[in-house]
Amino acid sequence: MLNKLRFNIFWLLDTVKGGYLRKEMNAVREILELKSFNQVQERNKPVLKHLLDTVVKESKFYESYSGYNSLDDFPVINKFIVKENLDALNLIPSTSSDLLEVSSSGSTGTPFRVYKTKQKVLRSRADLLYFMNMVGYTIGDQLLFVRLWLKKYRKNVFMLTLQNQRQIEVEEDLREPNIKEFLKGIQHDQQPKTILGYVSGFQQICTHLDNVNSPPLNCNIKTIIATSELLYPSVRDKMEYYFGAPVVSRYSNEENGIIAQQQINDRAFTINWASFYVEILHLDEDIPAQHGELGRIVVTDYFNFATPLIRYDTGDLGKFCNFEQDNIPKFETITGRIRDILYNTSGELVNPSIIYGGVAQFSEITQFQVIQKSKKNYTFKVNVNGEYANEDELLTFYKSYLGQDAEIDVEYVNEIPLLSSGKRRIIINEYDPKD
C-alpha cells in the first residue's frame, strides 16, 4: 500500500511540474520499442542534425566543421581532449546557474568534468526509469543501492524515505559485523526490492554468504542490476543463487548516463539508441571495426547542449551483434577499458571473460587480480579462504590462454584493496605492445 502511494505521489509531482518526465519516458519508449534499425535512424535523423548544426554555430571547438556532410566528418574525442578544450567545447558558459557539473573521480581514467543542461538531466532520468522498468523495477519498490557513497551523492533522510531508497556503503556496510545486520534486515523486511550496485560490493556479499555456508535467502528481491564494473559469471551465478532473482549488467558512465543494459534472459546488451548514436571503431584507427570485431565504444550524445560529446571515445571496448538485415544492433560484449585487457605472450588480446570465468573454477579464491608487467610477465594476486593447494592447476589453466611461456608470479595477499571509487580492478595492464 505504501509503495503504491509513493508511485502515485511520484507521478502526481511530475504532473504538477508539467509532466515533462513522463513525456521524455514516452519518447524513449517509442524509439526503443521500434523493430527496425532503419526506423530508429530515421526517427533520430532530425535530432542528430539539430545537434550538429548547433555545435558548428555555437561551439568554438566545432566551428571549423560547418561544412560537414555527416557525423563521420567530426573528430573522435576522448576524456583528455574534453579536459584540454572544455571552454571551447561548451555551448553555455560553465558559470551559468542552469547547468549541472558532473565530475569523475579519475580512479579508472583521466579525471575531468562536463556540464549538463536541465533537459539532459531530465532525459537521463527518463532513460534510467525506462531501463529499470525493463527489468522489473516499479517506482515505489525499495531500491538497495550499493556503491561508494561520497558526500556529493548522498541524499537526506526525507528524500530517501520518499524514494524508498537505502544507500549501502560498499566499504562500511558490507564489512563484518555490519553485513550480518544488513542481510538480516532485508530478510525481515519483505517489501519488493531491487538491488543496484557495484560488482565488488556483490562479491563481498557472496564471500560472506559462502563463508557462513548460507542457504538461499528469502528477501523478496525482484531484480539485481550490476553497474560500474564488469559482471563476471561467478558473481552473477552466486547472486542469483542466494537471492533467487535475475542479475543483469548495465553499461553507463557519469558523463553520458545509461548507454546499454541487459534484459532478463538476454546476455546481449540493449543499446540506448533513443539517446545516443553508438559506433564501434577500430582499436588503432578512427574507422569502423568489422562486424563482430572488438573495438572502441564511441558515443554521440543527442541531448547534452552544455558540453556536447560528439563521437566521444568512452575508453571502453565492445563488440556489436544482431546487425543482420534491419535488426537493431546490440552489444554482444562490453569488456572494459583497453588498460583492463591482457595480451598473451604472442601479443594477442585475451578475452577478459576468460580471466573472470576462470576464477570460478577455484572455489578457495575469494579475491583475484592479474597484473601484466611486460610481454611475458604477469603477477597474480590471490586472496584465499583457508589452505590453497591448487596453484599448479591455476597456472596450468591460465597459461593455456596467456601462453605456455608466460612467466607468472603468484602473490598471496590478505586483501585486494578497493580503489578510491569503491570499485576493485581485477585486471591491470602495465604493458603497452607498441613500446
Image (spheres, helix red, strand yellow):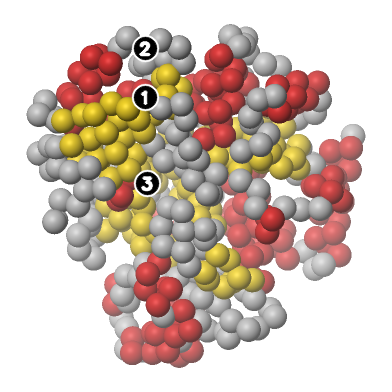
Q: Residue drawn 66% across and 36% down?
A: 172
Write down the residue under mark 2: 388
The answer to whether residue 324 of the structure is visible from this angle is: no
Q: Which amino acid, by three-letter code, is at mark 2?
A: Tyr
Q: Is residue 211 left or right of residue 156?
A: left
Instruction: Answer with mark 1 or mark 2, whichever residue precedes in sequence.
Output: 2
Instruction: Answer with mark 3 or mark 2, whichever residue precedes in sequence.
Output: 3
What's the distance in space between the residues labelled 3 and 2, CA to CA? 30 Å
Tell me the element at label 1: strand
Relative vertical location of residue 362 with respect to residue 174 in this rendering, above or below: above
The quadrant of the image that shows the C terminus is: bottom left
The quadrant of the image that shows the N terminus is: top right
Q: Residue drawn 65% across and 48% down?
A: 149
What's the distance in space between the residues labelled 1 and 2, CA to CA? 10 Å
Q: Which amino acid, by three-letter code, is at mark 1?
A: Tyr
Write down the residue under mark 1: 412
Write down the residue under mark 3: 336
Looking at the picture, tell me which residue is in the foreground, 267 or 250: 250
Q: Is residue 244 left or right of residue 140?
A: left
